Image: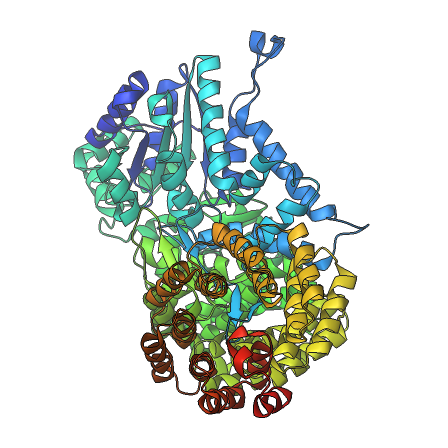
């Protein structure tokens, strides 16, 4: 068969080619990115071939096709592939004695080498511990998966368009604040690792690269392209075909980093996109175009009658009647006209006796009933291989060996069809043919269409179960790439076949894959059905399923970051564009949680209950967490102790935030009983013990954490806090100093260190410590309040009041700040204002001890023993250990310290 492509020029194509040629001659004054778009089969790929032929003597091309080219799933992989496709240095350049280093290759190799070292080389000791492994794994997955928050921008920490600012400190309440360390966001953990790891700790530039690889490697990629163009004295053209299949993170990377944030426009480098939809349909691209005019786009339509006639005459079809019939049947679509050309070149006759026949019938012309059935079955598959076709034939009662042809089996016959292509190790129908055959199948027999997808869902579920037995632990399944692939295909077909059950199965895998950080299991089927539903506006999904997927789309795309977060404790901040609000995202997640009760027992239900609890009122939260614990008991396994332990640790975290400290501790202890070499677990255990006022045990828990990893600053912080509660101030100070020796930019430690120094009456040193904290975290209310209290003890009242006034302005509804303001005013002799501040604290929250404690200081400073003791008693009733500890060291009570009743209060 001939590979010759008949090219018929159209005005749209001529304008596109002319504009592109002009841009190559004068880059600075012309667009950087060129897009040709139109529905499937309209001739986009043919136009790209014409463009390449036109400029092959002046330009080097790197071309990829999404869905066809392997290994381009992320921005980094795409850059690597495009770079690989460009010509390598030859001739004199290759023999240069001092060749200019390639900016992208060298930086990318450095990045990959460092990732490898972070994965395999420990911060200290002989082996990489679990915490380091998890930190690197979470960071790398965050950098990929969070980019899936589609269309408009990135989620996460890689210098991206959207960041989730999560509070890493949980307050337990009290006089001066009792900030205890909770689980930190991934970015903070990787920062700590980079500052401590031998491969990165002495290299600030390398740390910056690892924290923000996408923007830095993109700049290096652009610089490398420019260098190649200048060195070769040739144009560079990057072609991204079938762009409608490009992942969302690729689309965001393209507009935000490569197009907007580099200087490529001024150099002989151009980008060409071909896809079914205009990129300017998206707000982010439109804003970029409004600001910079970097994009030229051209829509291609089907051939008109004259163009169809010209094409057909080129291939030897000249009879006017036949031409009219062909145009009517093909609607002038180049894909179908090219199919007619291939049929003619192969010597096969085409019957156009019915001029208005459907194009499906035209493509299926000459096929018998079984052959047509096989094509329709194959069209239901995203991909197929011999085993799958053999299975389908068996289920349909068709003889695999001779069912469609006496000499070749069904699979070999199918793969020889013109519309079948081989992509990434599998066969598939090309997009246009698949759309046509699927739609015809659906319209002919919807019941059989659904049954076919049910058959395929069952097949892939069986394949997944053969790969990893259903009774094996979930981590074993999700760690197996073949299992993930088969399960993704199972879910895809289940969505078409199973209606409500298909939705629930999808949700179960969504929750489980998020928990185990393997989002491809659900992203692959979700992306496939969404693209299929929107590109051609087909409605092949069951109506309830289509409505369900549309309702959760926004929530799903942001689910990687938002599902495990309490909506009250995360914020979304966009850069350079306006995206969906947190409320819109959470509203789109709600339909996911309504079905949690109907999910089958297992990891999906456990994770669904856990995530739903974050969005429920306290009484519902307790019930959901208890049910999550029941699920954890069912799925824990000795084979994967870290996974099993995390099930209980995560429930413990949620119970802690509810203030259910005993239950949280019980859950945490279950987790640590399964896996006890987890320093963060022991450190968190100390926090719970402190909230239960079991301070000696809290110190012991920290010691266990530090015995596993003595370079864990959070454990030193919590140890110091427990020692403060035991009034072991010198030992607490030593713990804080050890934390700072590991991590000197830890504001919570500087704050707590200042509080210890204040209790030791070393007020100047305390203020210096607070200043260090404020240098790292300016305007922090806890630190400003503590600093103000220390200043007042040095009689620097104006400075002290300035700090407290700022805190009250920052958080006017928080009673502790009003009470501390009242204490400072009393020390300054401003008794009327002091009392008003303390009363305001009680007005804000009557059951908070701070207002009563402030009034006790107010009366003690005026030698009013009875009222001072009365208010101190009320404060102690609300928070005994805190108030007694504070009163023992507070000089405000010096005038009544010898009083018997005061001493009795302190003793309890």
- Residue 519 falls left or right of residue 235: right
Q: Position of residue 592 (x, y in %)?
A: 43, 74
Using the image, determine if residue 548 lies above or below residue 427. below
Name the quadrant containing residue 89: top right
Percent position of residue 420, x then y:
48, 46
Place residue 253 in its image quadrant: top left
Q: Is residue 768 above or below residue 786?
A: above
Q: Quadrant of residue 648?
A: bottom right
Q: Where 507 sits versus 742, above or below?
A: below
| Res 366 seen here | no
- Pick out the residue farthest to the right: 126
Quadrant that contains the C terminus: bottom right
Q: Residue at x 32, y 56 (%)?
A: 534
**Most foreground residue, 312 or 684:** 684
In this orientation, which residue lies closer to the viewer: 220 or 792?
792
Q: Nearer the viewer, residue 301 or 444?
A: 301
Front in this rendered view, residue 413 or 811: 811
């Amino acid at each position: 068969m001939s590979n010759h492509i008949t090219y018929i020029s159209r005005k749209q194509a001529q304008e596109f080619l002319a504009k592109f040629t002009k841009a190559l001659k004068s880059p600075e004054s012309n667009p950087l990115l060129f897009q040709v778009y139109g529905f499937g089969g309209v001739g986009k790929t043919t136009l790209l071939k014409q463009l390449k032929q036109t400029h092959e003597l002046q330009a080097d091309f790197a071309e990829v096709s999404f869905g066809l080219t392997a290994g381009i799933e992320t921005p980094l992989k795409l850059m690597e592939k495009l770079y690989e496709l460009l010509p390598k240095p030859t001739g004199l350049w290759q023999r240069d004695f001092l060749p200019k280093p390639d900016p992208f290759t060298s930086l990318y190799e450095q990045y990959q080498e460092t990732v490898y070292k972070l994965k395999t080389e420990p911060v200290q000791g002989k082996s990489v511990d679990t915490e380091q492994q998890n930190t690197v794994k979470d960071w790398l997955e965050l950098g990929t998966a969070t980019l899936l928050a589609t269309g408009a921008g990135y989620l996460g920490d890689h210098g991206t368009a959207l960041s989730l600012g999560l509070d890493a400190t949980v307050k337990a309440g009290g006089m001066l604040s009792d900030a205890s360390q909770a689980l930190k966001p991934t970015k903070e953990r990787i920062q700590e690792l980079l500052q401590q790891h031998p491969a990165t700790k002495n290299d600030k530039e390398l740390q910056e690269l690892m924290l923000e690889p996408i923007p830095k490697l993109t700049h290096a990629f652009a610089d490398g392209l420019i260098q190649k163009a200048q060195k070769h004295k040739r144009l560079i053209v990057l072609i991204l075909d079938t762009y409608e299949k490009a992942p969302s993170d690729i689309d965001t990377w393209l507009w935000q980093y490569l197009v907007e944030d580099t200087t490529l426009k001024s150099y002989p480098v151009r980008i060409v996109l071909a896809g079914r939809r205009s990129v300017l349909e998206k707000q982010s691209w439109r804003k970029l175009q409004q600001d910079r005019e970097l994009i030229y786009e051209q829509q291609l339509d089907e051939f008109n009658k004259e163009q169809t006639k010209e094409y057909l005459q080129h291939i030897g079809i000249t009879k006017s009647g036949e031409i009219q019939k062909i145009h009517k049947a093909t609607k002038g679509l180049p894909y179908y006209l090219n199919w007619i050309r291939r049929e003619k070149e192969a010597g096969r006759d085409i019957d156009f006796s019915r001029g208005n026949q459907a194009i499906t019938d035209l493509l299926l012309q000459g096929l018998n009933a079984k052959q047509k059935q096989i094509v329709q079955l194959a069209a239901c598959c995203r991909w197929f291989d011999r085993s799958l076709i053999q299975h389908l034939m068996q289920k349909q009662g068709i003889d695999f060996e001779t069912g469609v042809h006496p000499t070749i089996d069904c699979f070999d016959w199918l793969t020889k069809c013109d519309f079948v292509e081989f992509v990434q190790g599998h066969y598939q129908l090309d997009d246009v043919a698949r759309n046509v055959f699927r739609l015809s199948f659906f319209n002919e027999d919807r019941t059989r269409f659904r049954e076919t997808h049910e058959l395929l869902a069952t097949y892939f579920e069986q394949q997944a179960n053969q790969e990893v037995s259903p009774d094996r632990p979930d981590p074993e399944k999700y760690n197996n790439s073949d299992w993930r692939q088969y399960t993704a295909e199972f879910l895809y077909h289940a969505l078409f076949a199973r209606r409500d059950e298909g939705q629930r199965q999808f949700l179960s895998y969504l929750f489980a894959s998020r928990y185990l950080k393997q989002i491809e299991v659900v992203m692959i089927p979700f992306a496939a059905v969404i693209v299929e539903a929107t590109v051609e506006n087909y409605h092949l999904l069951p109506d309830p399923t289509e409505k369900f997927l549309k309702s959760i789309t926004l929530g799903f795309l942001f689910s990687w970051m938002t599902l495990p977060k309490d909506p009250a404790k995360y914020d979304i901040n966009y850069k350079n564009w306006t995206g969906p609000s947190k409320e819109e995202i959470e509203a789109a997640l709600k339909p996911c949680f309504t079905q949690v009760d109907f999910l089958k027992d297992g990891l999906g239900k456990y994770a669904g209950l856990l995530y739903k609890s974050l969005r429920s009122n306290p009484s519902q939260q307790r019930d959901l967490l208890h049910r999550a614990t029941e699920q954890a008991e069912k799925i824990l396994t000795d084979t994967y102790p870290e996974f099993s332990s995390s099930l209980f640790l995560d429930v413990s975290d949620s119970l802690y935030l509810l203030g259910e400290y005993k239950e949280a501790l019980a859950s945490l202890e279950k987790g640590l009983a399964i896996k006890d070499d987890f320093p963060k677990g022991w450190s968190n255990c100390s926090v719970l013990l402190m909230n239960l006022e079991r301070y000696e045990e809290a110190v012991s828990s920290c010691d266990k954490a530090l015995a596993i990893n003595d370079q864990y600053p959070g454990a030193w912080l919590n140890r110091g806090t427990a020692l403060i509660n035991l009034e072991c101030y010198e030992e607490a100070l030593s713990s804080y100093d050890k934390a700072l020796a590991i991590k000197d930019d830890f504001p919570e430690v500087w704050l707590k260190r200042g509080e210890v120094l204040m209790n030791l009456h070393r007020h100047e040193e305390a203020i210096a410590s607070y200043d260090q904290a404020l240098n790292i975290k300016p305007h922090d209310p806890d630190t400003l309040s503590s600093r103000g209290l220390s200043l007042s003890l040095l009689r620097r009242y104006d400075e002290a009041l300035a700090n407290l006034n700022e805190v009250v302005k920052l958080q006017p509804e928080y009673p502790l700040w009003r009470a501390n303001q009242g204490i400072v005013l009393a020390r300054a002799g401003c008794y009327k204002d002091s009392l008003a501040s303390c009363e305001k604290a009680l007005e804000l929250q009557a059951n908070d001890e701070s207002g009563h404690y402030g009034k006790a200081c107010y009366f003690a400073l005026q030698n009013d023993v009875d009222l001072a003791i009365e208010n101190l008693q009320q404060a102690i009733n609300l928070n005994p250990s805190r108030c007694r500890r504070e009163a023992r060291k507070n000089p405000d009570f010096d005038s009544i310290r010898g009083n018997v009743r005061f001493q009795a209060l302190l003793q309890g």
